[in-house]
Amino acid sequence: MNRISAQFQRLRQNQQKGFVVYLGAGDPSLEATQALVIGMEKAGVDIVELGVPFSDPLADGLVNQLAAQRGLESGTTPRKLLEMIRRLRLESQVPIVLYVYYNILHRYGIERWITDCATVGVDGLLVLDLPPEESGDYETQMAKAGLSVIYLMAPTTTIDRMELIAKGASGFIYYVSREGVTGMQNEVATNIGTMTAKIRAHTDLPIAVGFGISNPEQARHVASFAEAIVVGSAVVNQIATHGQDPDLVTKVVEFVRPMVAAIKS
């Protein structure tokens, strides 16, 4: 059982909901990312997603696009990110998912990427633009390495595709509650309960709901329909605002902590 599965098992036993946070790796530096991950764990975050900087992040809105650009400008590469995770594992055992575009795997070498991720302590991969129909033996290689295959479902996902995605997924299902790209929203989608019920008809995996959650009230509401919530752009926006502040980690933790409390209480 890898850290993701173990974390959700612990959450179930404690009758708690999970909090997943997204950070752009290397924004504003890999050293800052390492400190932020440790700060997130201390704030009660259950799983950390790290976005691997990429030049053409098609699934991301402006906030996360700019974070990816800052990550590239700070000199972050896939190899340097993996080395940072190796160092991080000396201090933290929080589950880590890499949010990554397929071109990076293709260039790095898929089998070598999976092996290297497992070696340094990554727990799962969310490959944004790799549909299960075109994944080849990716799922088999991931299972062999002990890594979770995180797949996305969306409001437009058909019942047939839900079944297909659920068969190949492990760790958790990431339900994208809105159509379009990542970004903060004033209101959360109104059909989350209906969609999570449909997904549960096809899988026993935990469901994490993301896209648009940016405050404690939204976090509490969405958590009532799912095993976990994902907060990304709102946190990345805080990093953009305070990126050059010596108190960056403290300020981001102070922003996240009330949302964690909202779903844990």
Image (cartoon, rainbow, N blue to C red):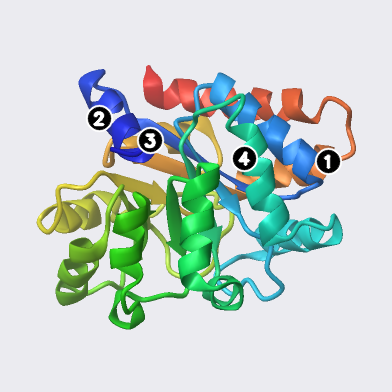
Residue at 45% across, 59% down: 126
Residue depth check, mark 2 versus mark 3: number of the one nearer the observer: 3
Q: Are marks 1 and 4 in contact (CB under 8 Å)?
A: no
The structure residue drawn at horizontal position 23% and vertical position 57%, both measured from the top left corner, is 195
Q: Disc 1 marks which amino acid?
A: Gly
Q: What is the three-letter code of the residue carrying label 4? A: Arg
Does label 2 or label 4 sit earlier along the sequence? 2
Give the structural element (helix, strand or loop) at label 2.
helix
Between the C-alphas of marks 2 and 1, the distance is 35 Å
Vertical arrangement, residue 155 with respect to residue 74, above or below: below
Crowd around label 4: few <14 · some 14–19 · many ≥20 (10 Å): some
Depth check, mark 1 against mark 3: the one in front is 3
For badge 3, the amino acid type reads Arg
Q: Give the labeled residue for mark 2.
A: 9
Q: Nearer the viewer, residue 139 or 97?
A: 139
Of the image marks 1 and 4, the number of the one nearer the N terminus: 4
Of 249 and 133, the residue lying toward us? 133
Q: In the picture, which quadrant includes the N terminus?
A: top left
Q: Secondary structure at mark 3?
A: helix
Q: Give the number of the mark in front: 1 or 4.
A: 4
Q: What separation in Å lies between label 1 and label 4 (alpha carbons)?
A: 23 Å
In screen coordinates, is 94 left or right of 236? left
Q: Residues within 10 Å of mark 3 (few under 14, many from 20)?
A: many
**Would you identify the image quadrant in which residue 174 lies?**
bottom left
Return the residue at label 1. 243
Q: Are the residues tagged 2 and 1 within 8 Å (C-beta)?
A: no
Question: Hey, which residue is sitting farthest left in the picture?
Answer: 201
61, above or below 196, in the image: below
**Tags 2 and 3 touching, CB below 8 Å:** no
Spatial separation of the CA atoms under disc 2 and disc 4: 25 Å
Q: Which residue is mark 4?
A: 86
Q: Contact (CB < 8 A) between labels 1 and 3?
A: no
